[in-house]
Image (tube, grey):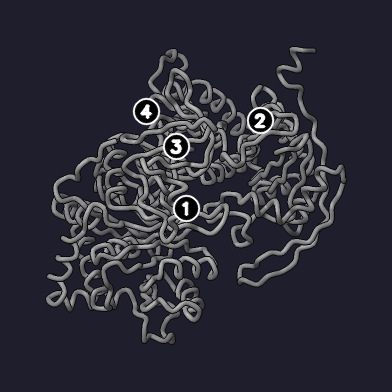
Amino acid sequence: MTEREPASGLVSIPALMARNAREHPRRAAYREKEFGIWQAWTWEEAHAEVRALAMGFLALGLQRGDFVAVVGRNRPSLYWSIVAAQMCGAVPVPLYQDAVAEEAEYVLEHCGTRFVVCGDQEQVDKVIEVQERIKCIDQVVYVDKRGMRKYDHSRMNAWADVLSEGRAAHHRFEAELDRRIAALTYDDPCVMLYTSGTTGKPKGVVLSNRNIIETSRNTCAFDRLGPGEEILAYLPMAWVGDFIFSMGQAMWAGFCVNCPESAATMMTDLREIGPTYFFAPPRVFEGQLTNVMIRMEDAAPFKKWLFRYFMEHARKVGPSILDGKSVSTADRLKYRLGDLVIYGPLKNTLGFSRIRVGYTAGEAIGPEIFDFYRSLGINLKQLYGQTEASVFITQQPDGEVRSDTVGVPSPGVEVKIAESGEVFYRGPGTFVEYFKNPESTASTKDSEGWVATGDAGFFEPGTGHLRIIDRAKDVGRMADGRLFAPKYVENKLKFYPNILEAVVFGADRNFCCAFINIDLTAVGSWAERNNIAYSSYQELAAHDQVYEMIRGHVEEVNRSVAADSMLAGCQIHRFLILHKELDADDGELTRTRKVRRNIVAEKYADLIAALYDGSATISTETEVTYEDGRKGILKATLKIVDVETQATVERREAA
């Protein structure tokens, strides 16, 4: 594996921003919606703001090698804070804005953060709470001034004031800032991002300028991304996906980053922007599909029939038309008619009318969900990656998109499968190290640069496409030796709008069982149409008719799973509907909504035991965390339901 030399002088994110300001000075670089109005900054304006902010940081005493935490919703001021920190030779550390104080405390103390840039009063309060226990924080900078008047400002400043100070003091600091920018190298840290921590404490992943820039250059070329693209920056800034799309690729290609007003207005803002390049984890696409299905259930009979008629045709020919394959003239004409009355209006409602390239990643997406979007003519593709790879390990080329693979190795990336079935990779995006954790670095990345992903997979013969089965630690065997891959079944269950989350058990057991979380929006709408009264999530989840509906979904999934000879043993025999949603605040999910299986298994050990001992009901008590941080106990008696399973292919043939 050979390392490419950087393009002339473009060895850092600040260097890329300066290039964009020179080459595209009047092109829109950032937009933000505030008070219902879109505001825009050109590359020239944004570059000037970032330089002024960086000089403001210098005035506050920011040193080379310092860590600068950034926490808040997606907005240009926070992205600029990241670049300003880089200009000063400091290392930005984005945090999850919905993390509770204890989670933030671990990250802030672990990296020894000196500066924290906060979006608003809520984030400042978290920092103040932990500041008494950790002594490394010297300065807090806040963007939104609301509620901040009576705070102690001895070590706290408004973002706008730091910016003004930088402008006023530019004669004192411009030369020093230029020296620091010039001193940046290709192998200096670009960002430190903390892993989601599915199995323990989060690890600080150090990514260099080389990692981010080379990955951005290669992947922009792969999908022909240029200055004309528009993206919506709405995913957590602490997630590597947002960093590579909204920072790395945006800086390399010079395209515009649009920031929504809030999470509540995201869908409206998405429709207004109409992005050409879009990325979302499966949960976003699942949520949108759920909303579509709810609306169609409430539609008039003719509209409902029209939707089903044309969607059936779209599933048959839509992906083939999208991939440029041969389709009969009659089918094409029918698809165009469907686009006029169904697909086009639906894409416009979703905000997907202009998408040229769309990606989903983070975890496996259900094949039915994936195929639904592609049938509408949306060029949705899958990629496989992780924080340690600067996202990209494999991705799907146009014309080679399938729901059951994650594509071919990304440009410059090598992938191999170990004898154990675990996937390994190395490439220009391979992380430098885990911060203050040489043992984990050595166990994850070997001396030749190969990184263990922790995922089990294989290359398909003939196509060279990678298929991921599941997390290697989650893939196992059942008591009779049959393969157990829980994510495969969980994704099939989550295709149904009524099912928000599912956790399947079965390793070393005689059969599989499942926990189900209902989707309150979807099931609540269904309950309203069926005149079912309820007063809470817990009451609705325990309703007999809800159990019957979910049983029907599980039995349909069993029929689908039975058709796969390799995984037919993963059919669900018994399930229960949990009395509460799995929640990141309760430690059951990561901040990116991945299930922490070991914590769920430990926390609900009594429920798992009841699933396997034949019990019809189980009474339980669960500790929950309320929005204000208080703890409480939730008591419930849950029903356990048996489900019909199907004979496998081999058993049917034997019979």
Mark 2 → mark 4, Cα distance in angstroms:
32 Å
Sequence-wise, which precedes: disc 2 or disc 1?
A: 1
Sequence-wise, which precedes: disc 3 or disc 2?
A: 3
Q: Which residue is at 50% across, 76% downward?
A: 130
Sequence-wise, which precedes: disc 4 or disc 3?
A: 4
Q: Which residue is at 48% across, 41% downward?
A: 453
Q: Are marks 2 and 4 in contact (CB under 8 Å)?
A: no
Q: Is residue 589 visible?
A: yes
Q: Which residue is at 68% across, 33% downward?
A: 477
Residue 440 is marked as 1
User: Horizontal and vertical percent for residue 475?
Assistant: 62, 37
Judge left or right: residue 406 versus residue 601: left
Q: Nearer the viewer, mark 1 or mark 3?
A: 1
Q: Which residue is mark 2?
A: 483
Q: Nearer the viewer, mark 2 or mark 1?
A: 1
Q: Which residue is mark 4?
A: 398
